[in-house]
Image: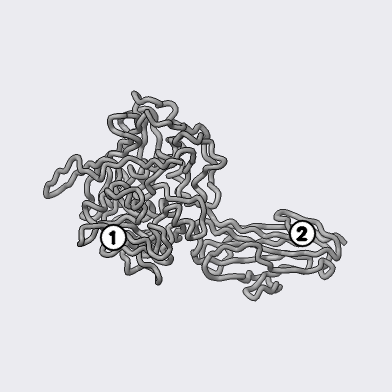
Amino acid sequence: MKRTRYQLASFTLIDLKLTLLSLAISVVSPSIAGTFEFAREHGVDIITHPSGYRGEGTSLTVRLGISPSSLHAEEMVIPIQNTISTWNNLLPTINNIVKEGSNVPADQFDFESVVLHEVGHCIGLGHPNLASESGLNSADRNFTQSTRGADNQFNLDKGPDGVSGSGDDLRGDDINLHWFRKSNNNPFSIATKVDMTTYSRDLSDLPPGNTFVANADRHVAALFGIQNTEAVMQQGVHAGEAQRTLTADDVAILRLAMSGLDKVAGTADDYSLKLEFIGFTDAADIVLSFDNNRASFSVCEISAEPINSSHFVITRGQIYFNSNISWFFNNIPPPFPPQHSTPVPTIFANSATDSITLSQNDSLALTVSLDPGVYGGNQTNYWIQAITPMGTFWLNNKLEFIPSEQPLRMHEGELFAIDHFPILNISTGELPAGTYTLTFTVDDNQDGIINDTVKSTVTITIAP
C-alpha cells in the first residue's frame, strides 16, 4: 500500500518580529511529540504550549471550528468531534493502527486520523521522527528527531538491530530533540508521573545499553513486542487504515508540557487542557478548512509567541486539507475507553473467566494472564485473593495460598506481561464443597495498599 506523508514546509518562518519584550512567530505546519514545535530553530529545550497558557496554573480551553465556507464542512463534524474526545481523554493505547476491521476503504485516507495528527501540532506537539522537514529521503526520515550537530549533517546509522529510530542507533554528534522515558527509553510505555524527573532529552539519562533515543515508529514498536502501534504524531499515513487513538508517546509529551514552566508535575504552574468544538466559525483558536492552495495533502499553520526563552505559547492555528485527496469521513463516534489503555488482568479457572461449576474429583487449574498495555515497566503490586468456605486466603510471593484477613502481595515490582501463568493445580476432591471467589488485582502504584485499580474475578462452585 502506498505510503503518503503529511505535507510539511521544512519549518519555514513566515513572519518574525523581534522586540526587546516579545517575539511573534508564524510557521507553516509542524516541525518537530516526543518533541515540540519550534524546538529546532529556537533552541533544543523549547517546549510549546496550547493557546492561552501564560505560565500560571489554569484550566485551558482551546476552541476548534470549521470554516463556514469550506468544502465538506458537514462531513468534517463527526471526525473533528471524535478527535476532540480523543485528545481530551488522553488515554495511551497500543494496537492503534487498524487495517483489517477498519471502516476505511483501501483506496481512501481516513480524515479523522489525519485531523488527530494535525490538531496535535496545533496544541504544540511535533514529529518524533526526522520527517520531511529534515530534507532527507523517505528511507531516513524515521530516525529520531534531532538537529544536525556540529558537523552540520545528520549521522544516521541503524545500529545492530537494523531499525531506524530505535535505541541502538548511532547518531554521531546529532543533538537529540526527543523527550524520552528515563527508566526504559520505551516510547510505548508511560510513567505514572510525567515531568522532568521521569523524562529527559539528555542522552546521559538513557538506560544502560542504549545509544540514542527510540521513537514511536511502528517498526520500533515491533522490537518491543508490540504490533500495529505508532505514535499519532509520527509523520506518515497509509490509505486504508485508521489511527484514531493516542499512544503513550503522544500522551506523555502533552502531559510533560502540562507540567508547566518548571517541568515538575503537581506544582502551581501546571495546567489542564480541554478542546471544545464551537461549530462553523472562522473565529476559533484552531480553524479547519479545505484549501488546495494551502495544502497538497494536509498542513497546519501556527502562530506563537514566547513566554520565556524556553517556552512558547501558540496564539492561533489553522489546518488545511486538499480536496483532491480521496478522503474517508468517519461518521461513527469512537468507543471509550480504547482497548489496552490500562492493564488487563485475567484469572482463569480451567478455561472460565466468569464462573464455573465443578463436581467433586474434577481437576481445577488456576492460571493468570496480564496484558500490561502501555504501562509495562511501571512499578506495581499484584494481589490474588481467594474467599472460600474455609475463610480468606491470599497468594504470597512464594505462590502459596496463606490464610489471612490482611492482604498479602503476590508481586512487588515492575508491571510485565503474563500468559496463563499457573498458580494452582488441584483435584476438587481436596476442597470442601461450596463457593470460591478468586480475584486478581493489579494496582497502579507500589504503596503496599490494595487499591483495586484493575482486577479480574472468577467464581468457582464445587458441588457436593
The percent coordinates of residue 383 (x first, y second) are 62, 66
Q: Amino acid at mark 2?
A: Ile
Residue that label 2 marks: 460
Where disc 1 sits, the SS reads loop
The circle drawn on residue 205 is none
Amino acid type, callout 1? Asn
Where residue 228 sits: x, y (%)?
50, 50
Packing grade of label 1 (10 A; few <14, some 14-19, many >=20) is some
Q: Nearer the viewer, residue 336 or 299?
A: 299
Counting the numbered discs, the total is: 2
Label 2, residues with CA under 10 Å away: few <14, some 14-19, many ≥20: many
Say whether marks 2 and 1 touch (CB < 8 Å): no
Residue extending furthest bottom?
398
Please give the name of the residue rendered at 20% of the width and 43% of the height, measured from the top-left corner: 13
Q: Closer to the N terminus: mark 2 or mark 1?
A: 1
- Whether residue 196 is visible, yes or no, is no
Corner quadrant of residue 448: bottom right
Residue at screen point 70% across, 72% down: 401
Q: Nearer the viewer, residue 4 or 117?
A: 4
Secondary structure found at label 2: strand
**Hey, which residue is sitting farthest top in the picture?**
69
Q: Vertically, is 177 above or below 112?
A: below
Left or right side of 349 for 316 = left
At horizontal 49% and vertical 46% (from top left) the residue drawn is: 97
Q: Position of residue 3 (x, y in %)?
A: 41, 42
As drawn, 237 above or below 371? above
| On screen, residue 449 above or below 283 | below
Q: Which residue is mark 1?
A: 155
